[in-house]
Amino acid sequence: MKKVGKPVFFIVVLLIAVIGWLTVFGVSSQYGDITTKTIKSVEDIRWGIDIRGGVDVTFAPAGGIDATEEEMKEAESLIALRLVNLNITDSELYTDYNKDRIILRFPWKADETDFNAEAAVEELGSMANLTFREGFEYDADGKPAGTTLEKIVLTGADVLSAEAVYTTDQSGNTTNMIQLKLKDSGREKFAEATGRLIGQQISIWMDDTVLSAPYVQEQIVDGVAQISGSFDAESAVALANRINAGALPFALETESFSTISPTLGLGAKNAMILAGAIAFVIVALIMIVFYRVPGFVAVLALAGQVLLMIASLTGFFTVFPAFTLTLPGIAGIILAIGFGVDANIITAERIKEELANGRSLDAAIDLGFKNASSAIIDGNVTVIIVAIVLLGAFGPTDSLFARILSPLFAVFGQAVAGMIYSFGYTLLVGVILNLVMGVFASRLMLKSISRFAAFRNPALYGGGEQA
Amino acid sequence: MKRKWNFDFYKNRKKYFIVSIALVVLTLAGTVLFGVERDVQFKGGVLLTYAYTGDVDADAFAAVAKETLGADVALQQSTDLATGRQNFVLSLTDSSTVDAAGQSALTAALAANFPQSGLELVSSNVVDATIGSEFFAKSITAVAFAAVLMILYISWRFRRINGWSAGLTSVVALLHDLMIVFAAFVWFRFLINANFIAAALTIIGYSLNDTIVIYDRIRENERVLGKNVPLEELVNRSVNQSFSRSLMTSVTTCSAMAIVSIVAYLYHVTSILSFSVPMLFGMISGFYSSVCIAPMLWTVWQKKRAEQKKKA
C-alpha cells in the first residue's frame, strides 16, 4: 500500500457516514398503510430482558423425572404453542437435552401495563390438557362449546403416541399424515365414538385451542388411526409433537424464574447510553489533543467501528442476524472500543517515534503502521480466543462454537447465562471490526489525508517533540 | 506525551513484587475477614424486589411474607434515588417454596395487607441451587480453558523470546489483575454474579493485551539489538518505549470506565456499577502489572536460566 490517493480519505469518511445514516435510520418504503423495512434501524435493536424488562424462566420436568429427548421436544412444542396462545410472539426458547431443561425468555411488550408474568409462567408449565371431543362447535373466542364442550372422547392419558408419516402414490405425490396410536384405555372409547360419528368431526384440543378437527371416515377398532388433511411435512410433525405433548406424563416446574420490570431496565439503558455518549466525547478529545491528525483519524475510525457494531446488532447485515443486546453485551462493546482506542494509540505512538528518529512523514506513517501491526494482531487474537470460548460455553447448544467445545462443557448443561453469550458476541464482532476500522480504514485515511499540503507538517503528527 | 521516558524498572523490581504481594495478601485477608457473597445466580435461592411508596413497617412486611411462604425470609430496605421509591428486597435461601404460583400468592397477600403502599414487584430471581452452582462451575471452567488457550497462543507467538516464560509470566500478571478485580468485589461488597464473570473476562483481555504490547517490543528489540545489550537494558528500554502507549491507553479506557461508573452511581444502576468499578480496578492493575510485574518476572526468569546454563 504505497500510494493512496487524496480522494480516499473522503471516500472512507463518506462510506462511514452512509453506513452510519443507514444504521441509525434504516430504509423503509411506504406502500399505502404498510411500511416495509428493507434495512433495519436503531429502533429495531432487540434489547435483552435485563434492559427492557421481561421474564427468564427455566422449566424442568416436575418431580425430577428423567425425560427422553423426544419427550423434551414435545414439551418444548407444547410451550411454543402456549406462547402463541398467550400472544407472546417475541421469545427465545431452547431445550437442553442433557439436563432436561427448557429455557425461555421473553420481554415485556412495549404497551404492556399489567401483564401477569407469574400466571403466564404457571400456565406455560402446567400439565398438558389434551382432549379429543365430539363434533366441532366453538364459541366466539374459539373455545369449545355445545356438544363439543360436553362430550370428551379421549384425553391425553389415552394416547400412546402420534407420529408424522407419509405415503407416496404411483404418480409420486406425497401425502403427509399423522399416525395415532392409542393405549388400551382409549381403544374401546375411540371405537365406539368413531362408529357413531362416521361422516362427522372429532376435534382435537390442547387446552382451549383446537389443533385439528378431522372427519371420521370409518370406525377405528384397533386403536390405530390416521389423520390426513392438507399437511406438509412440517405441519404434520408439529401436530404430532403437540398430540404427544398431551400424552406427556409430567408437568413442568420452574427451576429458576426471574422477572424484571421494564422501568428498572429502561433506567439502566438510558444511563448506559448517556455514559457511552459522554465517554465517547472524552475519548475523542483526549485523542485529538494528544495525537492531532492521527487522533482525528482515530476518532473517525472509532465512530465507524461503533456504527458497524450497532449495525451488526440490528440485523443490518444478513450474515449477522438480529441479536438480543443485554447489559453485558454493552460491556462487550465498551471493551471492543477500548481495543479500537488502543490500536490507534499504538500506531500514533509508533509514528511519533519514527518522526523523532528523523524519518520523513510518509516513511514514518508507513513504518508506524507496520511496527504496530504485530502487537495489535496478537492483542486482538487473544481476545478473540476469549470471545469464542464464551460463545461456545454459554451459547445455544446447536451453535457452531458450542458444538466444537461441547466435550468440555457438556457436563454443565445450558445454564442461565444468555447474557454472557451476548458479551461474547459483541466482543467478537467488535474486535473483528476493530481490525477492519482501527487498522485498515485508519491507515487508508491517514495516508490519504497526509498528502494534502495543509497536513504535511510533521508537528501535526507529534513530530519534533521528542527531539 | 512530550518526553522520552527513562525509568529503571528493573532496578525497582523487588519493590513492585512486594507491593503486588501485599495487595494480594490484603485481598485474601479481606476475603477471610469480611467474606464475599455469591448472588442467587450462583448459589441458588430467591430474591424478590418490591417497590412501594409511603411508610411501610418492615417487620410487618417480613411477617406477612414469612406467613404466606411458610419459610424464613430476610428483608432489606433500599431507596431508589432515580425514581424516589423505596424498595424492599426479600431473600430466601431455599428456592423450592417460591415457584410461579407461590410468587403470585405472595404478591397478592402483600398487596392485600398493605393496600396503601402502591406495591409493585420490580424484579424477581428464583434460582435452583444446582443450576446456580453449575453456572458458577461452568464460568470457572470457561475462564480456565480460555487461559490455557491464551498461554499456548502467546508461547507460540513469542517463541523468539522464550515463549513459555512469556506465556506463564503474562498469566501471572493476569491472575494478579483478576485478584484486584476480586478485591473490588470484596471491598465494595458487591455480590459475586454474572458481572464478576464479565468483568473477569474483560480484564483477561485487557491485561493480556497490555502485556503483549510490551513483549512485542521486547521481541522486536531483541531482533534488532540481538545480544549486544544486557538483558536488563533490553527490557528497560522496551518498557520505556512502550510506556507512552501503556499510559495513554490506560488513561483513555479508564476515563471512559470512570464516566460509566459515575453515571451508574448517579442513576443507581447497581447492575452496571458492580461491573464498571471492578473493571476500573482491573484496568489500573493491568497497566501496573504489564509494566512492573510481567516483564520483570520474565527478566528474572531469563537471568536464572542463563546462570544455570553457565553452571552446567
Image (spheres, coloured by chain):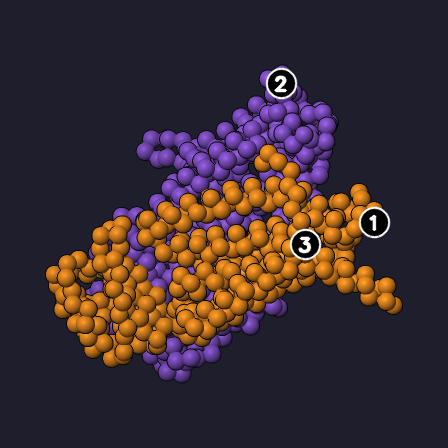
Q: Nearer the viewer, residue A212 or A428?
A: A428
Badge 1 is on which residue? B227
Question: As drawn, is A347 to the left or to the right of A126?
Answer: right
Q: Chain of mark 1?
A: B
Task: Find the distance from the CA under tag 2 to the CA under tag 3.
Answer: 47 Å
Instruction: Specify which label sits upstream in the sequence, 1 or 3.
Output: 3
Locate residue A440: give its quadrant. top right
Badge 3 is on which residue? B11
Question: Where A30 sits versus A255, above or below?
Answer: above
Q: Chain of mark 2?
A: A
SS at circle 1: helix
Which image quarter holds the C terminus of chain B?
A: bottom right
Which chain corresponds to the colour orange?
A: B
Badge 2 is on which residue? A452
Where is residue A137? Give x, y as percent: 25, 62
Callout in the foreground (2, 1): 1
Q: In the image, what residue occupies the spot 68% across and 61% down?
A: B168
Q: Amino acid type of disc 1?
A: Lys
Q: Amino acid type of disc 2?
A: Phe
* Mark 1 in CB contact with mark 3 (< 8 angstroms): no
